[in-house]
Image (tube, rainbow, N blue to C red):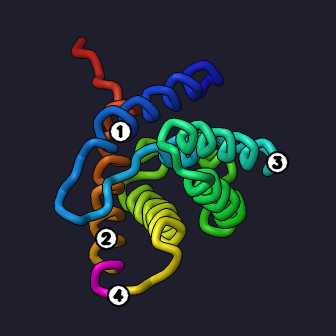
Amino acid sequence: MSAFKTILYFFLLLLIQRIILDNLFIGEFERPFILFVFIIIIPTLPTWALLLIAFLAGLIYDIFNNTPGIHSFSSVLLAFLKDLSLPFLFDNEDEISLGISSKTFGFGRFLVIALVCSFIYNLSVILLTDFGITDVQDFATRLIFGTLSSTVLVYVFDILAFYRRKEAI
């Protein structure tokens, strides 16, 4: 994936998150996040570059959303854990270097990656927003809803961005 396409995806995800998803209010549930997909789809980079890009992506969203560092921290945490865990989870470095999508990893492995990344991102955002766990049931409901809705959005974005229809001959 080219650098221009990656930057374009970031701004597209930022617009979707800011204009549509930030205005969704479904009861007291946590709003779904899709901005972290940018960190997932970035091809293999040196650790310092991945962390810097994740920080800048989170900082840009924090500036637009008036949240002091919550998404910056969550983005850097996700980027750090992604860079740390992917070589242990998958043997083939060529697959990882192409970027993470269901097209390169398959449905099952991409589902695991999307669920884990969504869980980590939502967990850190909820904990930093509330400064802890006061009501366990409310916390668990928000975490489960945020994780599942974000995972569905990751799949929708993945299908729209990476799958191309084969042309009929």
- Secondary structure under the numbered disc 4 in the rendered image: helix
Q: From the viewer's perspective, is the residue at label 3 or at label 4 nearer?
A: 4
Q: From the viewer's perspective, is the residue at label 1 or at label 2 nearer?
A: 2
- Circle 1 residue: 157
**Of the residues under marks 1 and 2, which one precedes in the sequence?**
2
Relative placement, left or right, of 127 versus 134 is: right
**Of the residues under marks 2 and 3, which one precedes in the sequence?**
3
Q: Amino acid at mark 3?
A: Trp
The location of residue 162, given as percent across then percent down, is 41, 32
Residue at left 61%, top 19%? 4
Position of 126 relative to 67 (above/below): below
Numbered circle sitting on residue 142 = 2
- Circle 4 residue: 136
- Secondary structure under the numbered disc 3 in the rendered image: helix
Numbered circle sitting on residue 48 = 3
The alpha-carbon separation of the residues under discs 1 and 2 comes to 22 Å
The range drawn in magenta is 135-139
* Mark 3 surroundings: few (<14), some (14-19) or many (≥20) residues within 10 A: few
- Secondary structure under the numbered disc 2 in the rendered image: helix
The alpha-carbon separation of the residues under discs 1 and 4 comes to 31 Å
Q: Amino acid at mark 1?
A: Phe
